[in-house]
């Protein structure tokens, strides 16, 4: 877990989210639509981003689920 003051931007691009999860941007988009991944935030007409804390929490949950 990273500290709250790690100086990372609060938002991450779809590309960054894909890299962080090792999933494709397209798959993340469809997973978001199905409620299986955090919803993106519309940042502009043609730009979305993901809340870094939500993506990190999603990853943490995947890690925790494997131990169950």
Image (cartoon, helix red, strand yellow):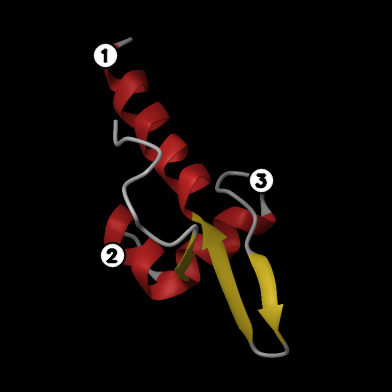
**Distance from label 3 to label 1 (Cα)?**
23 Å
Q: In the shown orientation, is residue 67 left or right of residue 39?
A: left
Judging by the rendered image, the residue that carries numbered circle 1 is 67
| Position of residue 20 measured from the top left corner of the image (x, y, whole percent) | 30, 57
Q: Quadrant of residue 29?
A: bottom right
Camera-nearest residue between 48 and 10:
10
| Position of residue 13 measured from the top left corner of the image (x, y, whole percent) | 45, 72
**Distance from label 2 to label 3 (Cα)?**
20 Å
Q: Quadrant of residue 19?
A: bottom left
- Asked whether the beta carbons under mark 1 and mark 2 sit within 8 Å of each other, the answer is no
Quadrant location of the C terminus in the rendered image: top left
Q: Quadrant of residue 12?
A: bottom left
Q: Secondary structure at mark 2?
A: helix
Against 25, is 53 above or below?
A: above
Q: Secondary structure at mark 1?
A: helix
Residue at 34% over, 55% down: 7
Judging by the rendered image, the residue that carries numbered circle 3 is 35
In the rendered structure, which disc, 2 or 3, sits on the residue that comes first in sequence? 2
Badge 1: residue crowd in 10 Å (few <14, some 14–19, many ≥20): few
Residue at 52% over, 44% down: 54
Looking at this rendering, what residue extends furthest in the top direction?
68
In the rendered structure, which disc, 1 or 2, sits on the residue that comes first in sequence? 2
Residue at 34% over, 60% down: 23
Judging by the rendered image, the residue that carries numbered circle 2 is 19
């Amino acid at each position: 877990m990273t500290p709250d003051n790690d100086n990372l931007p609060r938002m991450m691009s779809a590309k960054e989210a894909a890299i962080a999860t090792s999933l494709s941007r397209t798959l993340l988009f469809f997973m978001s639509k199905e409620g299986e991944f955090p919803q993106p935030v519309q940042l502009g007409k043609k730009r979305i981003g993901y809340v870094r804390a939500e993506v990190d929490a999603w990853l943490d949950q995947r890690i925790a689920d494997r131990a169950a």
